[in-house]
């Protein structure tokens, strides 16, 4: 009876180790256009699954717009750590809703007088999150974030 119990216990432990939730993969927004539903705007070239973590390439100033009549849900939204944006970056969800579950990181990404991160439309922030959005301070003010209707 004891060897059988050990075998069952060992199998239970192994199955618990492999029964973890699947990892949420990150995708990078390159944004040749603003259409969220266009696979070629993403690397790898596929529209992200719900709850994916989104990275915005440091080389793009093209914003993103939810389209196709489908609301989306993302994990975190992170802006590339290298390079800075000279223009605005807008996340539009005017006809759909974007649920943001994991916060935003954009430290030092918006540094010129006209650069800002703008969220426009319908957003759901379902849990407490950290949003770390930085710009430069000075006579023109901090060009961090705007929230618009």
Image (cartoon, rainbow, N blue to C red):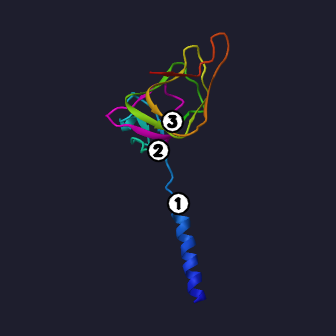
Q: Is residue 53 magenta?
A: yes
Mark 3: few/some/many CA within 10 Å (<14, 14-19, 20+): few
Residue situated in front as seen by the camera: 1 or 46:
1
* CA–CA distance in space, label 2 to label 3: 13 Å
Q: Nearer the viewer, mark 2 or mark 3?
A: 3
Residue 8 position, x and y percent, is 54, 79
Residue 102 position, x and y percent, is 54, 40
Q: Which residues are magenta?
A: 51-75
Most extreme residue toward the left, as rendered? 68
* CA–CA distance in space, label 2 to label 1: 16 Å
Give the quadrant of the N terminus: bottom right
Residue 4 position, x and y percent, is 55, 86
Q: Which residue is mark 3?
A: 125
Q: Which residue is mark 2?
A: 51
Residue 142 position, x and y percent, is 63, 18
Q: Are marks 2 and 1 in contact (CB under 8 Å)?
A: no
**Which numbered disc, 2 or 1, marks the residue that appears first in the sequence?**
1
Q: Secondary structure at mark 2?
A: loop
Residue sitting at x 47%, y 44%: 51
């Amino acid at each position: 009876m004891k060897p059988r119990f050990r075998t069952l216990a060992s199998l239970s432990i192994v199955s618990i180790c492999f029964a973890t939730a699947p990892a949420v993969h990150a995708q990078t927004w390159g944004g040749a256009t603003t259409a969220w539903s266009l696979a070629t705007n993403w690397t790898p070239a596929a529209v992200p699954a719900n709850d994916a973590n989104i990275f915005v390439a440091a080389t793009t100033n093209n914003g993103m717009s939810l389209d196709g009549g489908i609301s989306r849900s993302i994990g975190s939204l992170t802006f590339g750590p290298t390079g800075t944006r000279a223009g605005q970056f807008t996340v539009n969800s005017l006809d759909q809703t974007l649920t943001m579950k994991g916060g935003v990181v954009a430290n030092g990404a918006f540094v010129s007088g006209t650069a800002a991160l703008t969220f426009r439309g319908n957003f759901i922030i379902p849990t407490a999150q950290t949003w770390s959005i930085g710009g430069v301070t000075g006579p023109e003010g901090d060009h961090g974030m705007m929230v618009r209707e």
